[in-house]
Amino acid sequence: MEHKDLLLHPAEELAIITAAQKQSAAFHPLYEKYAETIFYFLYRRTHDEDLAADLTSQTFLKALENIKKFQPRGVPFVAWLYRIAANEANAHFRQSKTTPKLSLESIFAHRIAEETADSMTEEKLAQLATCLSTLNDADLLLIQLRFYEEKSFKDIGFILDISEANAKMRLYRLLDKLKKML
Amino acid sequence: MTKKVIFTNEKPDFKKYKKRLAFDGLLEKKRQKDQKRLRWNLMVLVLEVLLVIAMAYWAVNKLQKPRTFLPVEQEQIVPLVEKP
């Protein structure tokens, strides 16, 4: 996970959101806190630094335009940002008619390995990459959100616009599928 | 559709993009977008007003103009009283 320079208490964050809903300039602390997180999320989804930077900018522009619509309903503000970022990335792939290329840190691959295999050797890692490549876009996003962004099932449900139970069920089915493939 | 997953430990340096992703730039982009939207809304409003004026003008003209009849040929006029 990325280092956050700014530590905001949830109540403090809520106060900033309320202020940002009235005045755009008040959005600054939220931007400082989450820009890096969203940038790396988009980099993992695109494997392209420049594209990730562009999509980060678009994500925050959309967030700034729609912050008045944001209502905290038990999900953190960053989950809302993830949702916008995922939609922006999907829209980009649809428009450019390109396929997503996921760039995942191998040092965190053990998180998937713990669920699917006993140990993670170089050979197993290559095999895992091949298996993951066969999954569809939505499933890959689910894997990324759970094992790389370390999101809770509640947050994943919100980001993917599905229920928490559905997110859990889908992930366990996916891991079962991967286990059989490995 | 083929998707690729790469496992790597190389990570871009976010600091490189700090300037490009500066908050001031984001605010400026939003301001430009807001201005563009405002201009568009204003244009739509002007067009709507012009349309309403045109429709009102047409309606008033149509109501005020006397009814016009087709010219009647002389032969078709039948004298009411026959000549002795």
Image (tube, coloured by chain):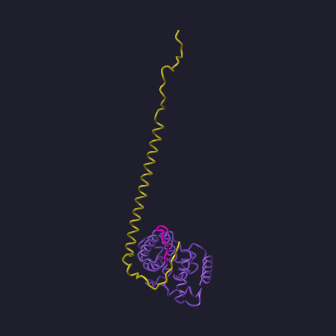
Magenta stretch contains residue A56: no
Question: Would residue A49 be visible to someone looking at this image?
Answer: yes
In the image: residue A103, left or right of residue A168: left
Tell me where residue B34 appears, x and y as whole percent: 41, 64
Chain in yellow colour = B
> Which shade of the palette goes to chain A?
purple
Q: Is residue B40 above or below residue A100?
A: above
Residue at the extreme left of the image, as rendered: B19
What are the residue bounds of the magenta stretch? A94-101
Q: Is residue B84 above or below residue B10?
A: above
Tell me where residue A21 appears, x and y as whole percent: 47, 71
The residue sitting at 56% across, 87% down in the picture is: A113
Tell me where residue A114 appears, x and y as whole percent: 58, 88
Magenta stretch contains residue A98: yes
The residue sitting at 47% across, 32% down in the picture is: B66
Question: Would residue A74 be visible to someone looking at this image?
Answer: no
Report the quarter where the C terminus of chain A lies.
Answer: bottom right
Tell me where residue A69 appears, x and y as whole percent: 51, 69
Nearest to the observer: residue B61 or residue A113: A113
Nearest to the observer: residue A117 or residue A165: A117
